[in-house]
Every structure is written in structure tokens, then in C-alpha cells.
Image (cartoon, rainbow, N blue to C red):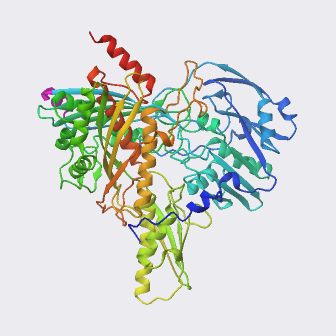
Amino acid sequence: MIGQSHPDRRAAARLRGAGCFVADVALDAPLHLAFLRAPVGAGQLATLDIAGALEVPGVVAIHTGDDVAHLGKLSVNPVLPILREAPYPILARGRVLHLGQPIAAVLAETAHAAQDGVEALWPDIAEDGEAEDATVAERTWRTGDCVAEFDRADHVVEVHVQHPRLAPSPMEPRAIAVAWGEEGLTIWHSTQTPHRSRSELARIIGLDPARLRVIAPDVGGAFGMKASLYPEEVFAVWAALHHRQAVRWCANRGEDLLSATHGRGIRSIGRLAVDKNGMFLALQAEIRAPVGPWLPNSALVPGWNAARILPGGYDVPTLDISVDVRPDGHGPVGIYRGAGRPEAACLMERLADAAARKVGLDPLTIRRRNVHASGALPLRNATGNYLDSGDYPAALEAASEAADYPALQVRRAEARADGKLSGLGLAFYLEPSGEGFETARVTWRADGSVEVASGSSSQGHGRETAYAQIAAEVLDLPLDGITVRQGDTETCPAGIGAVASRGTAIGGSAVFTACERLRARRLKGETLPLREDAHYENAGQAWGYGVYVVAVEVDRETGAVEITHATCVDDAGRLVNPAFAEGQIRGGFAQGLGEALMEEVVFDADGQLLTGSLMDYALPRATDMPDVAIHSSEHPTALNALGAKGVGEAGTIGAPVAILNAVLDALSPLGVRDLDMPLTPCKIWSAIAAAERETP
């Protein structure tokens, strides 16, 4: 069963529209919730007239910041030392902190009435633009003598990379439905982390967690945006308790673009010392990671990853790496698919290309010389990361062969001879997958059927099928005799959830471990029914890796980019379901293409959002996707029972910088050396025009 591409057992129902998302949950006479949001970025909230809104037909209640000022704060994962605590206002009180911040909440008998009530509210805000900008967290990694290495280097190259702010944009926006009962609340929440939602809600509101049941039904995508708990969701639960009535809130697309967490936005500066043979001697890197005025649970993770993953898969013994996390004057920033991994890869791969150009080597050659040698893994690198398994040179060779790299070089030369702007880009990347624990409860019933209850969750990964495959393999049972439960704090054991590419590696290992125990008990002669609970904690992060090869042509007249070739070689350890892995890579490539070519959250000079709808924020469409040739190798890790590594973020890590490198290679005959993503036609056309004006 493991290693076979069994079809997703829930896909058919979802394709028929038979799934159950939060908006599909039936509630008994719910109050519908809508929020008045801050129309400016920062200022003093002088007055708020609610009298007119209370007269709107169907409006039941209006709440302001004073009503919820007693509620607690969201916990923040301290992966970096926290220097300054950030507020966590449920509703603005006294001061508005960011554009789109909830100021007041309207509860009404219908969703339309709630929105009518919002439109009848009149806030008086004295805008002052005084946003907090002091450092929230920072850290430095240093090994060796960087000054000495840079002094003895034959070459020093430097690159600056500014990542655009991105809107994760899952198909299902944020949503929560709360059913009130005398014994407690049942909460349907579109979340990646139902058990964390339960514990955080209980702590913030001041409840016994036993009074809360959180269910993550079918979740229409998340990409990190739904890994934390939002003020609006906390308010919905508080309102259900306060009014002793069911409450529903479903964000619209504009609300998510305005007030949900954004991703990326990191600025990186890197300097690489190189000898005359192209060997990397030392790396200096400064990472500036933005956050908003309030911090989601994983707010510090992108900056942490962007720094500590350096120098990637390269053998660079001397390092000086620092990260500074601070507000950038806009709304909240959190994890987005990859969460610092694409930023680390982008900086290193831009430096590798710059070094290759400086020394006069082919980009593939310089990477071959500097990645950790075959047979070198496992090893602990200069930033303290334990690179567990794999063969990095073999991945480069496999990518070269799969893409027919020499033929792509010939094609580029022929296209350039015809006056075309043709380019070729490479990217080597690492993908550390999650660490920590996950749980599974496996029950082998008297009739021979098996139920797997997982502490992990799913938002379209096909994990219900993958976990059934693991159980079927270990217990030597047919797949259709195994059911999988997840995403319900009442019927499933407590776990962390679906973040950081951990679901298969750790959640799957928990299932594997529980099933192995059951199998051993059956072999000893124990009779059914039997049950095993596993609380599995991995021995460390498993590091997936891969190589992406992209060829492009740039239209000289319009600046439009056409991807003419794309090859991926990924190593995710032991693959449970190859088709699911391929789907993750292909979907990640689409999101990586989005960052590279079209996506960006844009604010004007006054701090107003210019990309507040999908008419303005450009998402990739099916017609934007090139054919992608996907290849894999399998070097199982010894750090978890299953031998699996993460693959959910691979495409978002490798694709953006491979595309960026390819476009810059295409423009290099014109002398264009650097551009920031997204590489829009306008930006590229302007660079071409400027270069041609400067050409004598």
C-alpha cells in the first residue's frame, strides 16, 4: 500500500459539491456577524456613534472594544528571542493599529442586516500614521572569522532581494460557526490547527477547555493563513457565550485580502566570499522580516527560517547571519506556504548565480562544486542544522539529465543568435519539515475493520487516504476496511495539526507506530478488539531538498515572460502516495510562479490597499501554468518512523528563484542584473527600455 498512488477517497464527494465547509454547517437561529473595519492605517479612535446602527432592522447588538477589553492574548511561538510584547486587541480600543482592523462588531438576524448595520456606523478617527516600528525579535548566527575570509577572497558578490507581500488566498476564506449549549460550545472552524484553536480560545476567553469542541470540517485550503487564531474568531466565540446563541462569521474575499495575515515581504542582503575556483568561503546575510501590529502564533517563523536555513545545501564554513523582525506599518504578517524557506533559497541561489558570473563558471558547475559532497550526509552544518540524509550532487545530476541541460543551453544560444531574450535558471533548495509531536489512536474492531483517529488535520492533502494506506500496509488489511478520523477535538486525540510539512512525516509516523504495536500484539495471539494510542515525537527535522530547472523567453516588445521548460527533481524521503506528492509539488509550483511573476499586495502612499479584490490582486490561472516535468528520488530519513520528509512547500521554495534566475539570465545581454519580484511585464519592459537607452 505504501508507495502506491491510490486515489483520494474524499475527492469524489467534494467534486460533486457534497463536502461540508463552515458555511454549510446548519445552526439553530444563528446571529450573523459583521465587522466595522478601520479605514486608515493608524490613529486615535475619538468617537463611534452606534445609535443609528442599532435602529437598522434585524440588528440585535453592537459591541465595541470596551466589551472585550478583558480578554487575554494569543500565544506566540518564541522561535526567536522576543524583545517586545505586541498587543492582541479583539476590537480596537482607543487606538487603531492597522488598516482593516476590526473596530466594532454587529450581530444581526441575517448576514445582510449585519452588513447594513456596519454601514450605519460612523467612526471618528484622528489619523496620525504613528505605527510601531521597534524590533520585536532578533538573533545572530556566527561561525569562523568572516572578516578574514572576505579579506582573502578573490571575489565578493552581493545581492539584495525584496520579496513582495503576498495574500495566501485559499479558496475558502476564514470562517467560524459556533453552536451554543448549556454544557458548552461546538465550534466549526476553517483551521489548520483545531486542537490549538481550542486551547487558545479557552485560555483567551477564560474557559475550561472541556467546554469547547472544535471541528475542522472540509477546509478549503489554508497555506499558513489559517494556522493561527484571528481576533474576529475569538469575538465570535465570546459573542456566542455572551448572547447564549449561535453565531456565524464567514469572511468575504475582500476582508481576507485586507485583514487576514499576509506572507513574505522579507528583505534580504547577502554577501558571498568566493575564491578563484568558485569555492564559497564565507557568507554574510542580513534578514529584515516584517510583522504587523499584532502577532499570529507563528509570526516569527518566516524570519527565523529565512536566516537559519542559510547557507542551504552549500558547504560554507564561515557565516555571519542576522535577522531583525519588526513592524512595517501595515497589517499582520504570518506564515505562508514555505514560511522563510523560499526567502533563504532565493538569497543563496541569487548569490550562487552572481558568483558564477563573477568567476566565469556555468551556474550548474558552481553549484556542483559547493553543495555538500555525496556521502557527506548526515552532518550538522555551520548554523547548527542537522542535514539528515540525501545526495545533493546526485540531485543536481538528475536534474541536469531530466531537463537535458546541455540541450537547453544550445537552445538558448540559438534563440539569442536570432535576437531573442532567452534565459535559463537553476535553483537548489532545502525544505526542513516540522518537528515535535503528533498523535494517533488506532482501533482494530472485532469485525476486522480499523479506525484511525489522528491528532493531525487536513485541508485537501488527501491525508485521509495516506493514513489509511499506512495502516493497511502495516496491518496487512484491505484499504476499504480502514476509516480515518481527524479534525475533531472530541473524537480525535490532541495533536498540533497541519503546519510546516509535518502531516505525513510526523502524523504518519504516529499512525505507523500505533499500527506496528497492534500488529505485534496480534502476532503474539491477542484477540480483537484491540486499541493502541501513540504519542509520537520525531528525533528532529527531516530535510527534503531538490533542484528546479526553468527556461524562459522574454518578449522584448511587451516584457511578458513565457516559461518554455520546467523540470523539478525533489527528494521527500519515503513517499506514501506519489500522486499526492506530485500534486503538492505542482500546486506549490503554481504559487511559486505567482510570487515570481504576478502576485503582490500593494499599498499607496497613504497606506490604502490597492489590491483589495481579485480584479487587482493577480492570481495564477490554469493558462499561466507551464508543463512541469516532475521527478523524484527517495532517501528516507532516520529521524522519523516512516522515513518521510516534507514536500508540501517544495514548489513554493524552488520555483520562484528558478524563474527569477531564468528571467535575469534572459535580460543579462542587455546588462540587466537585478529585478525584484513580481516580474510583471511592465517592470520587465521598463528595465529593457532603460537598458536600451543606456546602450550607445
Which picture quadrant has residue 695? top left
- Residue 75 on the magenta segment: no
What residue is drawn where x is 67% and y is 50%?
A: 176
Which picture quadrant has residue 459? bottom right
Please provide percent x and percent y for residue 254. Answer: 64, 35
Per the rendered image, the range of residues in magenta is 145-154
What residue is drawn where x is 65% and y is 46%?
A: 233
Q: Main secondary structure of the magenta part?
A: helix
Please provide percent x and percent y for residue 158. Answer: 27, 26
Left or right of residue 100: residue 586: left
Left or right of residue 65: residue 190: left
**How many numbered badges does the structure rendering display?**
0
Please provide percent x and percent y for residue 134. Answer: 47, 27
Question: The C terminus appears in which quarter of the rendering?
Answer: top left
Question: The N terminus appears in which quarter of the rendering?
Answer: bottom left
Asked if residue 488 shows in the view, the reply is: no
| Figure check: 654 above or below 134 | below
Please provide percent x and percent y for residue 15. Answer: 60, 57
Left or right of residue 486: residue 114: right
Which picture quadrant has residue 256? top right
> Furthest-front residue in view?
418
What residue is drawn where x is 61% and y is 28%?
A: 99
Most foreground residue, 487 or 92:
487
Asked if residue 131 shows in the view, the reply is: yes
> Furthest-top residue in view?
696
- Residue 149 on the magenta segment: yes
Most foreground residue, 635 or 95:
635
